[in-house]
């Protein structure tokens, strides 16, 4: 019996001749082992060391840049050329000058991507709201650290955070920066790793610090009372929904909408947009509006210009005479990036592990981490004062007999024996003796020694206080609160993003009603759609189709009507007739799968007018079952264009029939049997995806071919096929009842 290969076995070696006639060894390795040894280390490196921010609010690239600038003395000194900073940063971040400079641009005041920029920039650093406004080269711009960076590097030299070797072990760099405020929520951060991502929106510095203070004092504090919503450097208006925001705060996931701020200048009949959503750019807005104007969907605008200058963003929209600016802006908000959504994914590295957290959990983690930083700082200060006290205690013993100390030093023949002799003579340890031996000759006087020893009592009190602080959780938290209040006082700023409650949006005017005029709609089997006016149809009625394509449906409608398009993948698409351009019979028409964004291989099976969503739909399936569903179940309050689960997927769909009132129906099978019954026998189902009830009993190889209204059929001997209860077996269709064969649309 052959031995089964175990995936855990060592890689197998085999010989493989190459083109030169030599032999090379090829290692055969299970794919699982390859992923584990080769791919997983890469994935973890991207997650931990590149894309996901840590509790201090920075990614490694940000931290390395700011720490380099700190070590260059740019916190207090004058600005220097950005090229100098980029070059120095490469000692910590060897990923090329371009990547480092782009990081600096994002952190700069000139670019405007952060509410609290950390780089005080001079020169052209571009703008976050512009896609095409590129920043100048690093040799032309200058930068230094902003004042708020004092809060990032506070006490970093007091062992508040761990320091590790850089990539070539020539210098040390901090693992985290000891930020005195919750920068993780203040600075917006986005990162895409392997298999996960992070998208943290920015919040107002004052509100975040105040919320952190309240949570420290009361763990049950209602966050939304002090931190109502995110804040963005680009301003705009945040559409506030209480339930949505509460879900984001609780889970760290969700989305909200932000729209532009605008004003109407009546004297010039134009609209000025002066603040944009954080997620879009001026060029994206202009391109979308131009596209809508070109397609004829925006007829109210005569011109649009980008008038952005040194004073800030300004997009000017010239209106045609008589246009209502409120209605136009409501239309633009719905169809352009002037209103955009911001997706939240609060994914943060905690102790090297990615974790999605809500706002309260993030603040709790930050508080615990900051408490550890304060504790390490206190311990550092305490150790220093204890060391100093130890030296002063030794100096105090010398005070008892200074002459004796001088005699010991003078009478010692070898320099190496000075410290041991002092240790023996005064009963002090080596460190104390070394300190005494290093005192200058001019300082060997009673006044100097008395001043030094007078510090002893003060040091003892300070050490006692620091030890109490080190062991007191309450005092450490009070220290954090004091630092947060100081940060608010120094760097607090008012909100830039205005909060607008979504209830106020209900009064906004609806989109302009499309013009109403009669049209005829045509749908081909391959999914090509045509909307033809009566005048155009009278001029030419011969329809053009692609090779092997044919007419599937055709009916008269109105330009303002709403359509439902059912597909072969149990989905229904909603659209309006007015969304399509008028065309001619000689044109191929609009390819619906492309326009509606259908899935691969998805095609339209049936098209109907939605009307007022009254009545029912009958779905006839190949297995003999029929489902009766209310048309109202396809109506939605939102502007959703696609609904999944439009009908059951248990058996292939053969026919869809709209039903306004009960009538007689005829079902035909492939084996030539026909059944006539009343639609009143089919019970109404509450779910769209129901399988329905069995209507006709089928033999093993038989199946439903199609169904139709009895009034549309050619059947004369109705009594032969009619049943009063379902399911029924039906009867073979006679020749005189066949008439003209019905086209099977499916």
Image: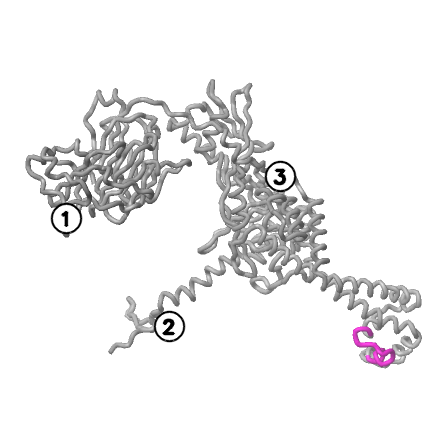
Q: Between marks 3 and 2, how big is the CA–CA gap? A: 59 Å
N-terminal of the pair, mark 3 or mark 2, is 2
Q: Residue at x 61, y 44 (%)?
A: 227
**Coordinates of residue 531 in the picture (x, y in percent):** 28, 28
Q: Nearer the viewer, mark 3 or mark 1?
A: 1
Front-lying residue, 427 or 85? 427
Depicted 606 relative to depicted 556: above or below = below
Q: Looking at the rendering, in which quadrant would you find the N terminus?
A: bottom left
Main secondary structure along the magenta-highlighted residues: helix
Depicted 680 relative to depicted 460: above or below = above
Helix, strand or loop under label 1: loop
Q: Between marks 1 and 2, how big is the CA–CA gap? A: 52 Å
Front-lying residue, 667 or 602? 667
The reply to whether discs 3 and 2 touch (Cβ–Cβ < 8 Å) is no
Q: Quadrant of residue 575?
A: top left
Helix, strand or loop under label 2: loop
| Numbered badge on residue 8 | 2
Front-lying residue, 442 or 154? 154
Q: Which residues are magenta?
A: 420-432
Residue 425 magenta-highlighted: yes
The reply to whether discs 3 and 1 touch (Cβ–Cβ < 8 Å) is no
Residue at numbered disc 3: 495
Neighbourhood count class around disc 3 (C-alpha, 10 Å): few under 14, some 14–19, many 20 upward: some
Neighbourhood count class around disc 2 (C-alpha, 10 Å): few under 14, some 14–19, many 20 upward: few
Q: Residue at x 29, y 39 (%)?
A: 566
Q: Quadrant of residue 24?
A: bottom left
N-terminal of the pair, mark 1 or mark 2, is 2
Residue at numbered disc 1: 702
């Amino acid at each position: 019996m052959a031995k089964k290969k175990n995936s855990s076995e060592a890689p197998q070696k085999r010989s493989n001749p190459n083109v030169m006639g030599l032999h090379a060894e090829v290692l055969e390795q299970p794919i699982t082992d390859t992923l584990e040894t080769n791919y997983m280390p890469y994935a973890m490196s991207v997650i931990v060391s590149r894309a996901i921010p840590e509790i201090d609010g920075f990614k490694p690239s940000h931290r390395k840049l700011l720490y380099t600038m700190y070590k260059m003395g740019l916190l207090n000194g004058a600005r220097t050329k950005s090229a100098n900073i980029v070059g120095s940063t490469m000692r910590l971040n060897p990923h090329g000058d371009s990547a480092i400079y782009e990081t600096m641009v994002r952190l700069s005041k000139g670019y405007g991507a952060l509410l609290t920029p950390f780089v005080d920039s001079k020169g052209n650093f571009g703008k976050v709201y512009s896609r095409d406004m590129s920043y100048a080269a690093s040799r032309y711009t200058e930068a230094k650290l902003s004042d708020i960076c004092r809060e990032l590097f506070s006490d970093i030299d007091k062992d508040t955070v761990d320091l590790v070797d850089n990539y070539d072990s020539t210098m040390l760099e901090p693992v985290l920066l000891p930020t005195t405020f919750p920068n993780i929520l203040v600075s917006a951060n986005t990162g895409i790793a392997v298999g996960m991502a992070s998208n943290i929106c920015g919040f107002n510095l004052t509100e975040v610090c105040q919320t952190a203070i309240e949570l420290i004092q009361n763990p049950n504090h209602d966050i939304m009372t002090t931190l109502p919503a995110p804040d963005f450097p680009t301003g705009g208006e945040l559409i506030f929904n209480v339930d949505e925001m509460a879900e984001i705060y609780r889970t760290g996931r969700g989305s909200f909408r932000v729209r532009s701020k605008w004003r109407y200048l009546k004297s010039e009949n134009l609209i000025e947009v002066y603040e944009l959503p954080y997620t879009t750019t001026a060029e994206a807005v202009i391109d979308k509006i131009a596209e809508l104007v070109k397609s004829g969907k925006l007829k109210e605008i005569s011109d649009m210009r980008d008038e952005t200058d040194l004073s800030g963003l300004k997009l000017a929209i010239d209106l045609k005479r008589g246009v209502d600016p409120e209605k136009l802006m409501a239309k633009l908000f719905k169809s352009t990036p002037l209103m955009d959504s911001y997706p939240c994914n609060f994914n943060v590295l905690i102790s090297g592990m990615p974790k999605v957290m809500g706002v309260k959990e993030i603040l709790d983690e930050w508080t615990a981490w900051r408490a550890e930083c304060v504790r390490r700082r206190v311990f550092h200060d305490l150790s220093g004062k204890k060391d100093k006290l130890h030296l002063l205690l030794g100096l105090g013993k010398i005070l008892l007999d200074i002459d004796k100390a001088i005699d010991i030093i003078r009478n010692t023949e070898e320099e190496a024996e000075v410290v041991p002799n002092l240790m023996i003579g005064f009963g002090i340890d080596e460190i104390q003796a070394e300190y005494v031996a290093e005192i200058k000759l001019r300082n060997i006087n009673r006044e100097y020694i008395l001043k030094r020893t007078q510090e002893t009592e003060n040091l003892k009190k300070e050490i006692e206080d620091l030890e109490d602080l080190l062991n007191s959780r309450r005092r450490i938290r009070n220290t954090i609160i004091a630092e947060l209040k100081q940060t608010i006082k120094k760097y607090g700023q008012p909100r830039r993003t205005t909060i607008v409650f979504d209830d106020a949006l209900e009064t906004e005017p609806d989109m302009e009603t499309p013009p109403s005029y009669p049209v005829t709609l045509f749908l081909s089997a391959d999914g090509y759609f045509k909307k033809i006016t009566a005048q155009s149809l009278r001029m030419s009625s011969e329809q053009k189709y692609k090779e092997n394509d044919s007419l599937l449906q055709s009916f008269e409608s109105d330009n303002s009507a709403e359509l439902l398009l059912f597909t072969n993948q149990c989905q229904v698409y909603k659209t309006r007739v007015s969304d399509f351009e008028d065309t001619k019979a000689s044109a191929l028409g609009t390819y619906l799968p492309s326009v509606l964004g259908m899935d691969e291989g998805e095609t339209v099976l049936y098209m109907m007018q939605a009307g007022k969503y009254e009545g029912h739909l009958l779905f006839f399936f190949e297995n003999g079952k029929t489902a009766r569903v209310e048309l109202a179940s396809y109506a939605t309050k939102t502007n959703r264009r696609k609904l999944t689960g439009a009908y059951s997927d248990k058996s292939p769909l053969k026919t869809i029939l709209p039903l306004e009132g009960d009538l007689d129906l005829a079902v035909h099978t492939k084996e030539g049997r026909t059944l006539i019954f009343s639609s009143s026998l089919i019970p109404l189902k509450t779910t769209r995806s129901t399988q329905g009830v069995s209507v006709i009993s089928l033999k093993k190889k038989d199946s439903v071919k199609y169904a139709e209204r009895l009034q549309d059929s050619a059947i004369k001997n109705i009594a032969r096929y009619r049943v009063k209860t379902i399911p029924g077996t039906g009867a073979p269709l006679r020749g005189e009842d066949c008439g003209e064969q019905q086209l099977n649309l499916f």
